[in-house]
Image: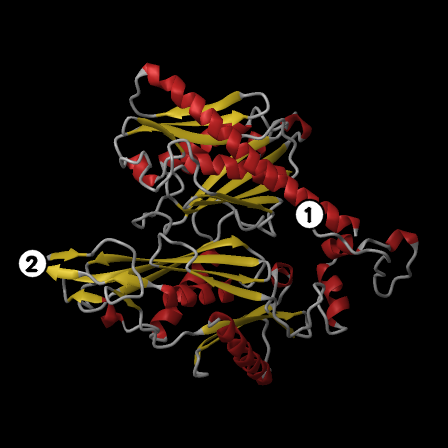
Amino acid sequence: MALTGLRIDGRRPGELRKITSTTSVLSQADGSAYLEHGNTKVLAAVYGPREARHRALVVHDRAILNVEFNVAPFSTGERRRRTKNDKRLLEMASFIKQSFEPVVIAALYPRSQIDIYLQIIQQDGGILQACINAATLALIDAGIAMTDYVCACTAGWVEREAVIDLNHIEESSDTSEVTIAMLPKSNKVTLAQMESRLHVDKLEELLSLASEGCKQIHQVLDKTIRDRAEDLAQKMAV
Amino acid sequence: MSSSTTTTPAAVNGLATSPAFTFSASTFQKLHPTEFFRNFVSQGVRPDGRLLSSFRPTTVHYGVITTANGSAMVRIGGTTVVCGVKAEVAEPKLDSPDQGYLVPNVDLSPICSNTFRPGPPSEQAQVVSESINRVLKESKVLDLKDLCIEEGKAVWALWIDVVCVSYDGNIYDAALASVMAALKNVRIRKPTYEEGVVKVPGGEAADDENSFKLNLARTPLSTSFVLFDTSLTLLTDPNFAEESISQGQISVTIDEQGQLCAISKVGAASSSQTLLKQCVERARKRNEELRSIMNQ
């Protein structure tokens, strides 16, 4: 970090990257959203509730959630073809599924399946965070009942400074990064992931920073949804 | 999602409009799709309001993916595709030591439509990929010798990936247009070759003397049609619903000099030669429009 206290891309430690979000971008999906955290660009599509693909997985009293990733080969610095069964992707899909399971009111849609497809268009750090936020918007756009938004944010120690919303360069450096997914209304955490070494004392600061970040992200997402709803209401009133 | 514009129930032709046989338009479409379309086509229009020979609004955006060497996004009506080109240094193929190569691939995944299942590429995706590959090769869109870095040792391999984001028919036109647009958009940093090592300078490729663009000999663009019903009515730029009930598909690929690069006709046995001529004529006009959209 420069002497001026700014990070490698000119941000302050507690500053998020620029977020751009739009809903209803895909005509075929029931709900969709496009989200950018700086240069990380993700497209989410929700199909459902619809008939379950496999009879064996059907649950009689609620819907099942299914999350799938598609990483475009041109999304990273070097072209890398990720197969569908890539363990990292399967792991991330499973995290996302588990973050949404407590929030989606699945009991309203028995015997059906809700599919969340995530298309990663460009990667610059914070993939899991972007995917969870995009999935939240897409689920709301699809009209699927949820108890709250799920907002995710990353936090980490970069050069002995606690920062949020790490980009790719910061993630690849010798840093410990934690991703938190939170329900902003109740302040409950549905997902916490960290894979590096971190001193126990430092965890609390990271967690509170990440929660702050989640709250800020919640405001942005909420505004997008409300603007869209007002827009629709105006058009329908005509 | 689509609101059914139903104020009057559609009468099934021939049958009296007694209450037992009246449906809303969208139900009728599901039960008798061909009959539903026939009611429109006989009046010279299609359910989405287009004339039989009209195209859906088309847009092209360049440089949408900054991590790729070249990229483009093409929308034709409800079909949206994103194409990214990445250049990698690779060893040349044994039988062409002074030529690079192009590897196109089209990805139709469940995100773009209800009808695609997860798993390995479907037959449709593979057929579209292979058609694009053939057009690139046979029309000699690019002189592959331009992609040579050091003969026999290192060449550029261009990986062309087309990701369909929303599918509403006519994937071939959209994919080919996006590939051509992305190739026009490609910028690669000039590499140096010393003692068996290729060095590619870092940093963004820009329009300066340290980067080069691709010299495209021609940019073929395609126009697709379907043949509907026993009358083999020609519908241009089919959407998904029209493709599903079509008897046959025709595709005409033309470059900017008006030269035919590829023709494909499958299904619907027809002996009419005027049909293909009609298609080529419409394709020529459409080509000009598409080129002016791409050159904006």
Q: Residue at left 23%, top 64%?
A: B210
Q: Position of residue B148 (x, y in %)?
A: 20, 67
Does residue B236 appear to the left or right of A192 in the view shown?
right
Which sits in the foreground, A89 or A126?
A: A126
Q: Tag 2: Cα neighbours inside 10 Å, few (<14), some, or many (≥20)?
A: few
Residue assigned mark 1: A231
Above or below: residue B277 compared with residue B204? below
Does residue A145 appear to the left or right of A88 in the view shown?
right
Check disc 1 and report its element: helix, strand or loop. helix
Above or below: residue A90 compared with residue B44? above
Residue depth check, mark 2 versus mark 1: number of the one nearer the observer: 1
Q: Residue furthest left?
A: B195
Q: Amino acid at mark 1?
A: Asp
Above or below: residue A40 compared with residue A94? below
Check disc 2 and report its element: helix, strand or loop. loop
* Marks 2 & 1, CB-CB < 8 Å contact: no
Can you see residue B264? no
Can you see residue B184? yes
